[in-house]
Amino acid sequence: MDKNIPYKIYLEEKELPTAWLNMRAVMKNKPAPLLNPGTHKEMTFDELRGVFCDELVKQELNNTDEFITIPQEILDFYKMYRPSPLVRAYFLEKKLGTPAKIYYKFEGNNTSGSHKLNSAIAQAYYAKKQGLKGVTTETGAGQWGTALSMACSYFGLDCKVYMVKCSYEQKPFRREVMRTYGASVTPSPSDTTDVGRQILSEHPGTTGSLGCAISEAVETAVKSEGYRYVLGSVLSQVLLHQSVIGLEAKAAMDKYGISPDIVVGCAGGGSNLGGLIAPFMTDKIRGIKDYQIIAVEPASCPSLTRGKYAYDFCDTGRVCPLAKMYTLGADFIPSANHAGGLRYHGMSSVLSQLFDDGLMEARSAVQTDVFKAAVTFARVEGILPAPESSHAIKVAIDEAMKCKETGEAKTILIGLTGTGYFDLKAYEAYNNGTMTDYIPTDADLQKGFDALPKM
Amino acid sequence: MDKNIPYKIYLEEKELPTAWLNMRAVMKNKPAPLLNPGTHKEMTFDELRGVFCDELVKQELNNTDEFITIPQEILDFYKMYRPSPLVRAYFLEKKLGTPAKIYYKFEGNNTSGSHKLNSAIAQAYYAKKQGLKGVTTETGAGQWGTALSMACSYFGLDCKVYMVKCSYEQKPFRREVMRTYGASVTPSPSDTTDVGRQILSEHPGTTGSLGCAISEAVETAVKSEGYRYVLGSVLSQVLLHQSVIGLEAKAAMDKYGISPDIVVGCAGGGSNLGGLIAPFMTDKIRGIKDYQIIAVEPASCPSLTRGKYAYDFCDTGRVCPLAKMYTLGADFIPSANHAGGLRYHGMSSVLSQLFDDGLMEARSAVQTDVFKAAVTFARVEGILPAPESSHAIKVAIDEAMKCKETGEAKTILIGLTGTGYFDLKAYEAYNNGTMTDYIPTDADLQKGFDALPKM
């Protein structure tokens, strides 16, 4: 054990970041704008404010301000569970016998079980400030819905969650946490919306998808007086709020004179990775340090590693704006054996642009390898990681083992997004040896690409 | 918000206690000794070492040393998840509108989800040091089994867990966490032991009890070469290890010039409460401050509030030593509607003696009141508390509301033992309004008293 570096580094509350960091302000090539799906023209503030809260639309469209002050009410809530710990993975290093120095920024010490709360509380705050009655959203694995229900409960807002049907059925406990915080939870597709009824009639046996749940949540928001839609990932505003992860991680490292060589995070829609890398990426763009930044995605949902960089629909119902992103097509649904989140068909426009510019790399992993890494980590570090987070652990272990071969003592920073307490069905399958992998064929993916909108 | 007191107080790693505190050394009336169930003579070191590790037997019998050094290997493990936060419940205070100052010592930020890990790692360490192959134990709600499986995995020990059958069936996820850490989990009563087979033949439909699972685990340990039995509560050694909770809490409070007027914790076998109160009780015995110390137990399993202070069997199979404790009788099983832990028929000999000496008080609560307090707490403090911990929350809220009436600004310290992520079935019943209460009648309890051993 390095005498100077404690196992856990906690910043003090007064060291909490007071502003979010907006990577877009520093990016040379800005992310492509959202387009109106009918006219293919750039979405305006006025068009977007029917769907999102005004202040969040401003943040969504803001490509110029590098720092955006965090309101005091949000800072107060952050103090409930932040600063989150930066942990030196001494036990994992020892287990691997690697000279690498591994750190993880752990976002799982709150009841939502993940980093999602960082943006949920911000979005709920702006909805409350605007005098709204409530918000609608979708949730897949359930972390986002849980986080939003906690945030809405705190501000006394109504919260309507459309939960992907297969998760609703497989994860009744997540549903119950949301209900405990006062949210209503509807399995999607449902008969409560036009788009849900249409999807049900076309695909009667469907177990749902994020894209479909988004369509239902947006329709409900637009049709309900005093409601807006909120989203837990993909959007630039969400990455902005999540920058608190990276800012804290960098502040904690700076305090001890540590600088990562590799920053690795899982990537589904991009909320965690976009937040984790924010201060490192801006330094990298400015030429301060050439960090190696790695996105890890499931081999079963490989938007960055095998997707197309193109304008696409954000939702199955095609009611949302078009976004330019690495995408597998709006109808893509990961195979049924895929466990956990990271199942969205596209990637944040911000991250897509950074990837396209060669500023970060991407890797994919099959889930049996991911769970193997998860169990290795759990047994030595004492935290049962979420399947999502374990994608980053898998690649961090790969990199640490490379260091073992070369003798390099690289410093690796992992974004450990959350805990796997609600993913024990998947762990059970892994423990029983019944977990399987699926990698889509090129032909599978081509169907999604063929359905991309003609621009 | 009090400017000088942060929301969360974290001690630094170097401030971790380096010795456990043994209340027995300070108690004027020592807890009654364990007796041989056959001869009714005091159990000797040699008799006990067939069941427990040598070092743990020494700790069990040690009524004289006030401080016992924590071995470095255990301190290293503690650093994975300790010091645990002491949290000022600002949001709860505001919600209640009370002048009381409420703090909680939160032990749930580890994968076992509770304080149980504090003793599990100590017991696994001494087993490893003695060169044993493995340990056996029982678990009810599953926290202890999870904690022990984590500790055994860390030291490379085999871990055989007998899990109360109704929990095994109702809580498959806890079971899966234990398996992820490499433990074998057997529903109890089982056909793997003589006592299990006997209980199954006498009570074919039984869903099991802690007392029965203890008997099976002890039998397996005694009959297996290189194995010993370990226990997660009740024993004096366990309270000793758990003193790290109270020592940290007091150190964090001392650092900010805070002193509690009321210390409140839930009590099942007594491990949490005995650890939480340790430094406060020793000060109280020495006349330094007259803390109000409150044990809270379920109305459905009221050993302190309605039990008899007598020698009793620790287990259903009557193979363990006799302990003098407040007890409901070794065959007592809480009614089937009882959710969560705190279901042991007796109370730690140490706490029983302190209670009998008038040094602490005890209250009971019905579970619908407990869950009401849990949901109130979850919604404002952002932590979904374990049903067990929520007993303490319930009484803390009662006391804070008394302060609201009287205008007193008492300082209340709650032992928040863990999280409720694996108790969502119970939360679901509460959310749906189908949770019921049960208070045993005097006649129910009399049956248990009639079966107490004749001394």
Image (tube, coloured by chain):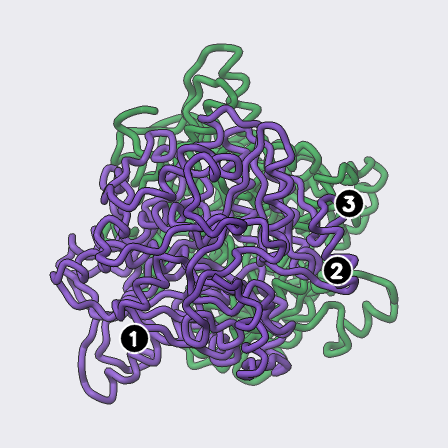
Chain colours: A green, B purple
Quarter of the N terminus of chain A within the rendering: top left
Towards the viewer: B279 or B372:
B279
**Would you name the residue on which mark 3 appears?**
A449
Q: Is residue B381 visible?
A: yes
Q: Amino acid at mark 2?
A: Cys
Of tags 1 and 3, which is closer to the observer?
Answer: 1
Q: Residue at x 56, y 63 (%)?
A: B330
Q: Secondary structure at mark 2?
A: helix
* Residue occupying image coordinates x 76% and y 76%: A194
| Residues at discs 2 and 3 both on one chain | yes
**Camera-nearest label, 2 or 3:** 2
Number of numbered labels in the structure image: 3
Q: Chain of mark 3?
A: A
x%, y% of residue B407? Answer: 18, 85
Pointer 1 chain: B
The numbered mark at residue B93 is 1
- Residue A57 visible, this angle: no
**Residue sitting at x 54%, y 65%:** B343
Spatial CA span between label 1 and label 2: 39 Å
Seen in the image, is B315 located left or right of residue B282? Answer: right
Q: Which residue is mark 2?
A: A166
What is the crowding at mark 1: few (fewer than 14 residues within 10 Å), some, or many (at least 20)?
Answer: many
